[in-house]
């Protein structure tokens, strides 16, 4: 028989061993590289075949597993009906039981993959019910925050829902400098973050570079407001998207900056160029590039 003190010591010791084991397993599965959280935006796998009449859940889980990654930002169209009228998508979002999204979460969890972010891009066509439902879906999926390729006008309508659900929404940038309603500049990010304490930044360093901004300088100054990065490579001056390491985006410098400062900013691969291999092949290349960059 154990005394109460011996039993407590045994429990604490066992917990410490388990936590250490879990941490080592996370390193092995690919959720961390030298202290930096890594994963993939599942948009990277958009070219993979979708089962007839179904969603991409099983396909994504296999692709993530094959790549050795265990954390993702889930792109909403991959779990929604494909090639249907806009009103049908709206109805599906609002009426689908939340248990459906809980079941998706369980599938990912069973494969040791976490859905850390849900990419649900609010735009001006969204009804209030759709906006609200996005937060409910994100919770059911187990996501910590939402990412959104949105606009300043749409983001203003999202504010009360972010406040209601107390969930962060990270705005994603593109490189369109001609439309002031788009997120593309440091000023547009600043304007969004003034709207709500729940608004933060999902910085795409490829698009930021193509728009001729300095990702290293921006991250250094605004790291507290950044949830995650999209790791892709582009040329400056609105240049093309290229394989990792072949463009002008300071990928290595950005990753080293996060590593050295131990900032809790996740780095998610986003495969967008036209590669020679399958999406899985190309994401594996990007993952290896990140490993070398963080060595």
Image: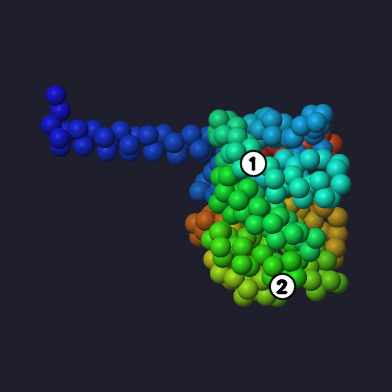
Residue 114, horizontal then vertical, whole percent: 57, 41
From the viewer's perspective, is 60 left or right of 225? right
* Near-viewer residue (214 or 43): 43
Q: Position of residue 231 (x, y in %)?
A: 69, 52
**Other residues around mark 2 within 10 Å, as few (<14) / some (14–19) / many (≥20):** some
Q: Residue at x 70, y 61 (%)?
A: 128
Q: Is residue 56 above or below residue 192?
A: above
Residues at badges 2 and 1 in contact (C-beta under 8 Å)? no
Q: What element carries label 1?
A: loop
Q: Distance between the residues labelled 2 and 1?
A: 35 Å
Q: Is residue 258 visible?
A: no
Instruction: Name the quadrant containing residue 47.
Output: top right
| In this rendering, position of residue 144 left or right of residue 278 | left
Q: Residues within 10 Å of mark 1 (few under 14, many from 20)?
A: few
Is residue 244 shown above or below 181?
A: above
Q: Disc 2 or 1, which lies upstream in sequence?
A: 1
Is any atom of residue 91 visible in this view? yes
Query: In the depicted view, which residue is nearer to us: 279 or 215?
Result: 279
Residue in the picture at 66% in, 65% down: 158
Q: What mark, if any, has residue 2 been given in the picture?
A: none
Number of labels in the image equals 2
Identify the residue at the far top of this view.
Answer: 1
Q: Name the residue under label 1.
A: 97
Quadrant position of residue 187: bottom right
Q: Eyeballing the image, is 213 above or below 229?
A: below
Classify residue 175 as left or right of residue 203.
Answer: right
Along the viewing direction, whichever of 209 and 112 lies nearer the viewer: 112
Mark 2 falls on what kind of element? helix
Residue 61 location, x and y as percent? 66, 33
**Residue with the mark numbered 2:** 188
Q: Quadrant of the N terminus?
A: top left
């Amino acid at each position: 028989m154990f005394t109460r003190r011996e039993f407590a010591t045994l429990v604490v010791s066992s917990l410490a061993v388990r936590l250490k084991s879990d941490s080592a397993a996370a390193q092995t599965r690919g959720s961390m590289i030298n202290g930096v959280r890594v994963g993939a935006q599942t948009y990277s796998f958009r070219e993979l075949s979708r089962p007839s009449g179904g969603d991409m859940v099983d396909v994504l889980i296999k692709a993530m597993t094959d790549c050795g990654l265990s954390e993702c930002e889930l792109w909403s169209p991959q779990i929604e009906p494909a090639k249907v009228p806009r009103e049908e998508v709206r109805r599906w979002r609002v009426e689908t039981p939340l248990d459906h999204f809980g079941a998706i979460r369980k599938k990912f969890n069973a494969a040791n993959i976490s859905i850390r972010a849900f990419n649900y891009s609010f735009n001006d066509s969204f009804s209030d019910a759709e906006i609200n439902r996005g937060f409910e879906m994100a919770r059911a999926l187990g996501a910590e925050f939402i990412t959104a390729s949105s606009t300043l006008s749409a983001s203003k309508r999202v504010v009360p829902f972010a406040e209601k659900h107390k969930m962060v929404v990270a705005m994603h940038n593109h490189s369109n400098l001609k439309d002031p309603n788009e997120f593309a500049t440091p000023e547009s990010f600043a304007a969004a973050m003034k709207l709500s304490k729940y608004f933060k930044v999902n910085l795409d360093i490829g698009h930021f570079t193509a728009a001729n901004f300095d990702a290293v300088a921006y991250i250094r100054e605004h790291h507290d407001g950044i949830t995650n990065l999209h790791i892709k490579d582009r040329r400056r001056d609105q240049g093309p998207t290229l394989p990792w390491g072949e463009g002008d985006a300071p990928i290595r410098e950005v990753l080293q900056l996060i590593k050295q400062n131990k900032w809790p900013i996740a780095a998610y691969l986003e495969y967008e160029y036209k590669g020679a291999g399958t999406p899985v092949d190309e994401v594996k290349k990007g993952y290896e590039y990140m490993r070398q960059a963080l060595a």
